[in-house]
Image: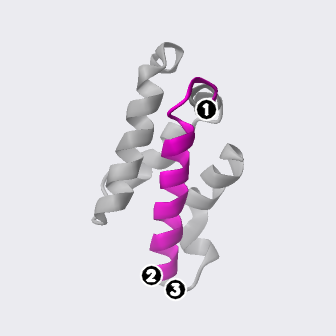
């Protein structure tokens, strides 16, 4: 599931013609990833799938919620000690 969400977040603007829909899908994907990354198993899976590399692209977004959820994913993954390496 994380792998698919990561793929969607990475290529959403290529998959959807409407910019509004693409932004909404990106926000929902990032929000889902952040909720998964809260628990221990989700953190490990996010680290293994290198989700941080994908959400990093959204840190400079002008859309508040994209930046917000991207920073949450990174923060939750960074708490996982093996993820800091």
Position of residue 80 measured from the top left corner of the image (x, y, whole percent): 48, 19
- Where residue 71 appears, x then y in whole percent? 35, 43
Which stretch is magenta? Answer: 20-41
Of the numbered discs in the image, which one, if any, rests on residue 20? 2
Q: Is residue 7 above or below residue 15?
A: above
Q: Which residue is mark 3?
A: 18
Q: Nearer the viewer, residue 20 or 15?
A: 20
Q: Is residue 85 above or below residue 73?
A: above
Q: Is residue 54 magenta?
A: no
The residue at the point 64 percent across, 26 percent down is 41
Q: State yes or no: discs 2 and 1 in contact (Cβ < 8 Å).
A: no
**Residue drawn at point x = 54 percent, y = 46 percent:** 33
Residues 77 and 39: in front is: 39
- Majority secondary structure in the magenta region: helix
Bin the neighbour count of mark 3 within 10 Å (Cα to Cα): few under 14, some 14-19, many 20 and up. Answer: few
Residue carrying label 1: 42
- Residue positioned 48% across, 53% down in the render: 31
Q: Which mark is residue 79?
A: none
Q: Is residue 9 above or below residue 77?
A: below
Residue found 42% across the figure and 45% down from its top: 56
Left or right: 66 as drawn, with respect to 36: left
Q: How is the image coloured?
A: one colour
Tell me the SS state at disc 1. helix
Task: Report if the CB atoms under discs 3 and 1 are less than 8 Å apart.
Answer: no
Question: How far, Cα to Cα, is label 3 from label 1?
Answer: 31 Å
């Amino acid at each position: 599931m994380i792998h698919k969400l990561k793929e969607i977040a990475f290529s959403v603007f290529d998959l959807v013609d409407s910019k509004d829909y693409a932004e909404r899908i990106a926000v929902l994907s990032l929000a889902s990833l952040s909720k998964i990354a809260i628990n221990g198993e989700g953190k490990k899976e996010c680290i293994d799938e290198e989700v941080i590399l994908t959400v990093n692209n959204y840190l400079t977004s002008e859309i508040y919620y994209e930046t917000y959820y991207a920073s949450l994913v990174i923060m939750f993954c960074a708490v996982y000690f093996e993820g800091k390496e």
